[in-house]
Amino acid sequence: QPKLVIDNLHVSVEGKEILKGLSLEIKGGEVHAIMGPNGTGKSTLASSLMGHPKYTVNSGSVMLNGEDVLAMKTDERARKGLFLAMQYPSEISGVTNTDFLRSAINARRGEGNEISLIKFVREMEQKMKILEMDESFAQRYVNEGFSGGEKKRNEILQMMMLKPQIAILDEIDSGLDIDALRIVANGVNEMKSPEMGVLVITHYQRLLNYIKPDFVHVMMQGRIVRSGGPELAEKLEAEGYDWIKEELGIVD
Ligand code: ADP
Ligand code: MG
Ligand code: MG
């Protein structure tokens, strides 16, 4: 069963410290949600976990199944089973969704253990059906000309095909209407199993009506300041973040 342990992580961007001692543990089967005001470092956490070169880890550790994630290059992190669905997915010109996914899957499976074409195609069709994606998306270039909602669905398709150990979903709800949100959430819920831990990052509680978290964490000023169950998200929805700021003595 997968396990990601983030311990006292300090990260800076362009010389400014953004994450200031963030700790979090995610196990297979668990859905964690991180909520927090804008600019608090949520996306910085996601990018740092994937090894984005702009983010410098100053101290702390990240371990996946006992292995040092921070010592791995980005592609190795992906191969070991870390997955990030981004707030703003990028386009990959000239590479079809099918080719992209097949090579990503095979990179994870390793040489001599490649997925058969038939099995791959069948699985992709099945997942695309769940996500209500048109068949033509298989042969289109990754995210090129996709609408915001289509890009988000495509991110979830990648997740469903790659079967990561830990999936990080950074504001997948931004820019989605209710129907698209429901479809995307279905995809995530469909995958819930002891084989995968999920970290859902969101500014709004709305997403958590569709993807039910087991644990909710509030992030402020680069660290987790409160943790609880789903009721914490409901309290935030009703009362906003001010009460936490008051309790912490944060003035802004
Ligand atoms: P959130 O996702 O919680 O809204 P971010 O992690 O995106 O917050 O941003 C936290 C802070 O770090 C902000 O002040 C932002 O301007 C800064 N920051 C994040 N990424 C970059 C970057 N690539 N370049 C410069 N500043 C950044
Ligand atoms: Mg933001
Ligand atoms: Mg963000």
Image (spheres, grey):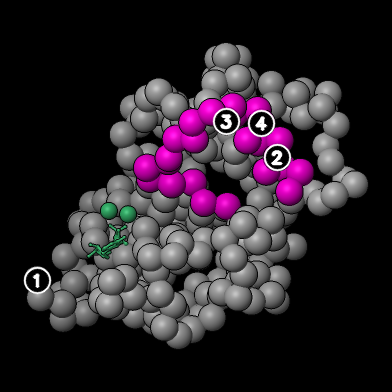
| Residue 38, position as x, y percentages in the image | 23, 57
Residue 151 drawn at (x, y percent): 44, 31
Between marks 1 and 2, how big is the CA–CA gap?
47 Å
Q: Which residue is mark 2?
A: 103
Relative depth, front residue between 127 and 32: 127
Mark 1 is surrounded, within 10 Å at the Cα level, by few (under 14), some (14 to 19) or many (20 or more) other residues, namely few
Report helix, strand or loop for mark 1: loop
The crowd level at tag 3 (other Cα within 10 Å; few <14, some 14-19, many 20+) is some
Q: Earlier in the sequence, mark 3 or mark 1?
A: 3
In the image: residue 104, left or right of residue 240: right
Read off the residue under disc 1.
Answer: 252
Q: Amino acid at mark 4?
A: Asp
In the rendered image, the vertical position of residue 201 relative to residue 95, given as above or below? below
The mark found on residue 21 in the picture is: none
Marks 3 and 4 in Cβ contact (< 8 Å): yes
Could you tell me the amino acid type at mark 1?
A: Asp
Q: Residues within 10 Å of mark 4 (few under 14, many from 20)?
A: some
Which residue is tagged 4?
Answer: 99
